[in-house]
Image: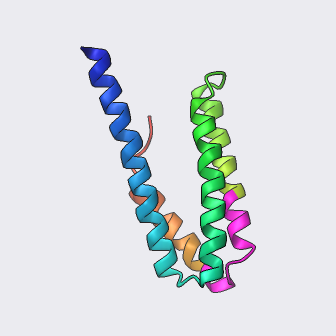
Amino acid sequence: MTGIIAGAAMAQTQKDTKTDQKEWDKKVKTELNLTADQVTKYDAIGLEYSGKMDALVKDANLTKEAQKERKMELKKEKQTRLFEFFTPEQQTKYTEMVDKKKATKPKES
């Protein structure tokens, strides 16, 4: 019974993460007023890094600490790629949005 509950809780967490990501993407596109070309590039990069994050989470060879470090590296890498086509104003706004999101996010133990 415990396995079923744990599995359901994990599935719910993954579902929440995907929903949160969709909401975040929508917010970024709206608040940064991305052009159609920027939206296409943003979506492509988001898809690429979503795959990388999923693979990272499934990698049983990594410790939690190594996984966390690699996640941070991927996030920085993704932001660098986004900044290649964001305007300076969009870069500033995006950085503010990320900082605000980090401040409201519960700490992982």
The picture quadrant where one finds residue 69 is top right
Main SS of the magenta part reads: helix
Which quarter of the image is occupied by the N terminus?
top left
The residue stretch that appears in magenta: 78-91
- Relative to 78, 34 lies left or right: left
The image position of residue 37, as x and y in percent, is 65, 80
Residue 83 visible here: yes
Q: Is residue 21 above or below residue 63?
A: below
Q: Residue at x 27, y 16 (%)?
A: 2
Residue 91 visible within the image: no
Residue at 44% x, 72% y: name it: 27
Q: Please tell me in which quadrant of the rendered image residue 41 appears.
A: bottom right
Q: Residue 45 location, x and y as percent?
A: 66, 61
Residue depicted at 58% across the width and 70% down the height: 95
Residue 81 among magenta residues: yes
Residue 10 position, x and y percent, is 37, 32
As rendered, which of 56 and 68 lies closer to the eye?
56
**Chosen colour scheme:** rainbow
Q: Residue furthest left?
A: 1
User: Any magenta on residue 15?
Assistant: no
- Horizontal and vertical percent position of residue 60: 61, 22
**Is the C terminus in the top left, top right, bottom left or bottom right quadrant?**
top left
